[in-house]
Image (cartoon, grey):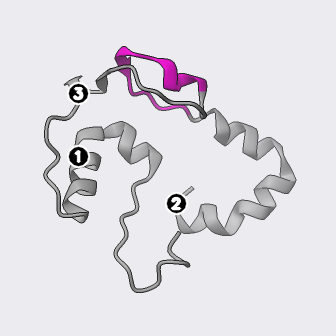
């Protein structure tokens, strides 16, 4: 949300970039806030070892534990293209962020 944080530090990480290199993305986030990343949960490229949490709301995938692959899901691209209203309304933002 660049508009609200004018003059503040921010880091833009596109979803596709996170999926391609999740460890690098998390290291960049840690560096931005002046923290060390510690032990990241990755056991192999694109594979995270997730422990159970006490999440209450969110996507159903929040319940997944153990070895969880980090995979690109770009179904939204084809769904958005088929809806002309959504495509028209989101065009400026999509163009700005390289979609």
Question: Residue 46: where, in percent of width, then height?
Answer: 30, 27
Residue placed under numbered mark 3 in the picture: 42
Q: Which numbered dot is residue 98?
A: 2
Question: Residue 37: where, in percent of width, then height?
Answer: 17, 46
Q: Quadrant where the C terminus lies?
A: bottom right
Q: Could you tell me which secondary element the residue under label 3 belongs to?
A: strand
- Specify whether residue 71 is painted magenta: yes
89 or 25, which is in the foreground?
25
Q: Residue furthest bottom?
A: 7
Q: Could you tell me which secondary element the residue under label 2 belongs to?
A: loop
Would residue 52 be visible to someone looking at this image? Answer: yes
Residue positioned 53% across, 69% down in the render: 1
Q: Could you tell me which secondary element the residue under label 1 belongs to?
A: helix
Mark 2 residue crowding within 10 angstroms, few (<14) / some (14–19) / many (20+) = few
Q: Where are the magenta residues, as a range?
A: 60-73
**Quadrant of the rendered image containing residue 76:** top right
Residue placed under numbered mark 1 in the picture: 24
Question: Residue 61: where, in percent of width, then height?
Answer: 53, 23
Contact? badges 3 and 1 (CB < 8 Å):
no
Mark 1 residue crowding within 10 angstroms, few (<14) / some (14–19) / many (20+) = few
Residue positioned 20% across, 35% down in the render: 40
Give the CA separation, mark 2 to mark 3: 28 Å
Contact? badges 2 and 3 (CB < 8 Å):
no
Would residue 44 be visible to someone looking at this image? Answer: no
**Quadrant of the rendered image containing residue 9:** bottom left
Question: Residue 2: where, in percent of width, then height?
Answer: 50, 74
83 or 35, which is in the foreground?
35
Residue 67 appears left or right of 15 = left
């Amino acid at each position: 949300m660049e508009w609200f944080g004018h003059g503040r530090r921010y880091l833009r990480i596109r979803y596709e970039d996170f999926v391609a290199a999740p460890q690098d993305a998390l290291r960049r986030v840690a560096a931005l806030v002046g923290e060390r990343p510690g032990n990241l949960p990755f056991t192999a490229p694109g594979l995270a070892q997730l422990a159970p949490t006490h999440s209450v709301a969110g996507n159903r995938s929040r319940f997944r534990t153990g070895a969880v692959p980090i995979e690109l899901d770009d179904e939204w691209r084809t769904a958005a293209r088929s809806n002309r209203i959504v495509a028209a309304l989101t065009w400026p933002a999509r163009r700005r962020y390289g979609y």
